[in-house]
Image: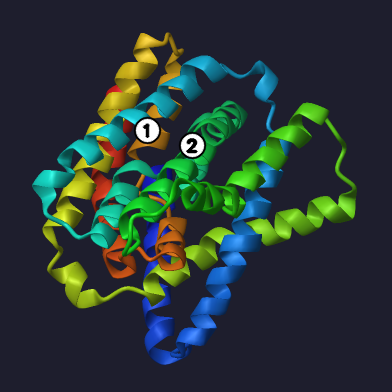
Amino acid sequence: MPVFHALLEVFLLIALGVLLRRVLIREDAQWIGIERFVYFVGFPALLIRTLADAPLGSAPIGAVGGALASAVLLMSGICLALRPLLRLDGAAFTSLFQGATRWQTFVALAVASALYGDAGITLAAVAIAAMIPLLNVINVWALARFAAADRPRGRDVLRAILQNPLIWACIIGLALNAANLTWPAPVAALFDSIGRTSLPLGLLMVGGGLRLDRVLRPRAATFVATGLKLVVMPALAIGLGMLFGAHPTGIAVIACCSAVPTASNAYVLARQMGGDAPLMAEILTVQTIAAAVTLPAVLALVS
């Protein structure tokens, strides 16, 4: 039931975004303003706050973080190896790449907390520290490399990575965690309030950019991304977790973090960097529906 409820909330927020786009918020400029807030302010605030307060010192960073980071690298290699066979243009390939590699942090945190309490939250924070900087570097590189009309220079890719606010948010959060600073109450409340708004707004934006006709007739790329993300990625991560010696709760959180749908902010990144945003929205919605079946099944296998 916690898995079902977490996924239902995600899907309902996407559906509300569809409704708002068609009834209340019809102008592109309004959605662009929301998009910039989420990308540059909201989600970075959530990452900083989560990482700064997580008890990372007592967590099995090597086993859990190492397994998830290794799974991301392997999946990235699989996507690049499949690219010649997929026959997609550069922008569409980057959406498939994001759909196969990224993870929906909101769902993973909700499920890990509901099923495993404080231990689940701590292990999910390890996953955030291991995966989000790596995923953003890899996906920013993929978008700069494949979505651009011309092959980018190395320094242009590096500039795009260094300008990514999510990477800097992870660096700041980990630095604050290492410094073990006490947050002033007003600052903590501000970051909590901003962070709580970012993920729901990101999902509303996905709904706002969704074309229902494409969801009803998904492209082949959507099925490939869904199979890679919801089946192959959990198998890789769980196998690596066992190989690295993760304990049972660690294996369960690895399963949870690897088997969730792709990230809602993948749509924002696609919009910001020239990816195929409609395909990205389609992949996210189809994966969210499919994960209502696959995520409980994966968790049942490791419980």
Q: Position of residue 41 (x, y in %)?
A: 66, 61
Q: How many marks?
A: 2
The one nearer the camera, 22 or 303, is 22
Q: Position of residue 137 (x, y in %)?
A: 48, 42
Q: Position of residue 229 (x, y in %)?
A: 27, 42
Question: Could you tell whether 17 is left or right of 174 in the image?
Answer: left
Q: Quadrant of residue 135?
A: top left
Q: CA distance from mark 2 to mark 1?
A: 8 Å
- Are the two marked residues, 2 and 1, in contact with CB atoms closer than 8 angstroms? yes
Q: Is residue 246 above or below residue 104?
A: above
Question: Residue, x 50% and y 24% (percent of image)?
Answer: 65
| Amino acid found under the numbered disc labelled 1 | Val
The colour scheme used here is rainbow
Q: Position of residue 265 (x, y in %)?
A: 47, 58
Question: Could you tell whether 87 is left or right of 232 in the image?
Answer: left
Q: Which residue is mark 1?
A: 72
The one nearer the camera, 28 or 301, is 28
Quadrant of the drawing holding the N terminus: top left
